Amino acid sequence: MSAETPAAESGQFHLRRQQFRAWRGDRPFWAGLYVLLSGLPIMYFPYFHLQLGHLTLAMATTAGAGSLIIGVLLIVLGISLWFQKHVRTFAGVAAILLALVSLPVSNFGGFIVGFLLALVGGAMAVSWAPGGPQQPAPQFAAAPVAGVPAEAAAAPGPVPLSKQDAAAEGIPAQGSEAQGENDLSGMNPANGANGRHSAG
């Protein structure tokens, strides 16, 4: 036995655990487990004999075969929820109906334990829905700045000021457009707007 053996075994265990988690997350696992477990007390108690000292108390009912059939059907439904997840709605409704039928047939549904497990598991199976594919995290783009082209806003570095911002801060705007008649902002006193926006 080498020093790497425990690490390899723990790595194998971790891999199997991850595979089981992925398999479990892709189907109504807990619903199937509850429905499967509900069949055991429903099937067992009608054939169970309780010993109290020298007294034997038989739990058998007249519908012992019916209890056995209900228990086997619940176990089959639980397994089908694991391996045939597309029948989850049918299996969930059938589990709820079998749980209700087990109340008068099988010692109050296996002394209420099997009844409650089948009821909860069936409801979980009906309400389960497969998850959608994981969406990649959205890339947030910089908010567009008024008067600045999108290319300039996306580029790193100082953001150029718009003509209006430059005029408000008293910085002379570059280029000949801001000088006089070609300024269409309506804020330049040189074109007679007197600091007001023109309507057209």
Image (cartoon, grey):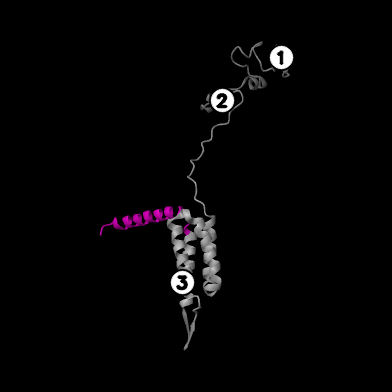
What type is the residue that disc 1 sits on? Pro
The residue located at (46%, 54%) in the rendering is 85
Say whether residue 10 is magenta: yes
For residue 72, say whether it is visible: yes
Q: Which mark is residue 159?
A: 2
In this view, the mark in front (3 or 1)? 3
* Residue interval drawn in magenta: 1-29
Residue that lies at the very extreme toward the left in this rendered image: 1
The answer for how far apart the CA atoms under marks 2 and 1 are is: 26 Å
> Which residue is denoted by mark 3 in the rendering?
68
What type is the residue that disc 3 sits on? Leu
Report whether 70 appears left or right of 198: left
10 Å neighbourhood of mark 3: few (<14), some, or many (≥20)?
many
Residue that lies at the very extreme toward the top in this rendered image: 181
The residue located at (55%, 60%) in the rendering is 123
Residue that lies at the very extreme toward the bottom in this rendered image: 54
Q: Position of residue 5 (x, y in %)?
A: 29, 57
> Which numbered disc flags the more N-terminal residue, 2 or 3?
3
10 Å neighbourhood of mark 2: few (<14), some, or many (≥20)?
few
For residue 27, say whether it is visible: no
Q: Quadrant of the N terminus?
A: bottom left
Q: Which mark is residue 189?
A: 1
The answer for how far apart the CA atoms under marks 3 and 1 are is: 96 Å
> Which numbered disc flags the more N-terminal residue, 2 or 1?
2
Q: Position of residue 195 (x, y in %)?
A: 73, 18
Q: Is residue 200 above or below residue 96?
A: above
Q: Position of residue 110 (x, y in %)?
A: 51, 72
The quadrant where residue 116 appears = bottom right
Say whether residue 81 is magenta: no
Q: Is residue 137 above or below residue 3?
A: above
Callout 3: SS: helix
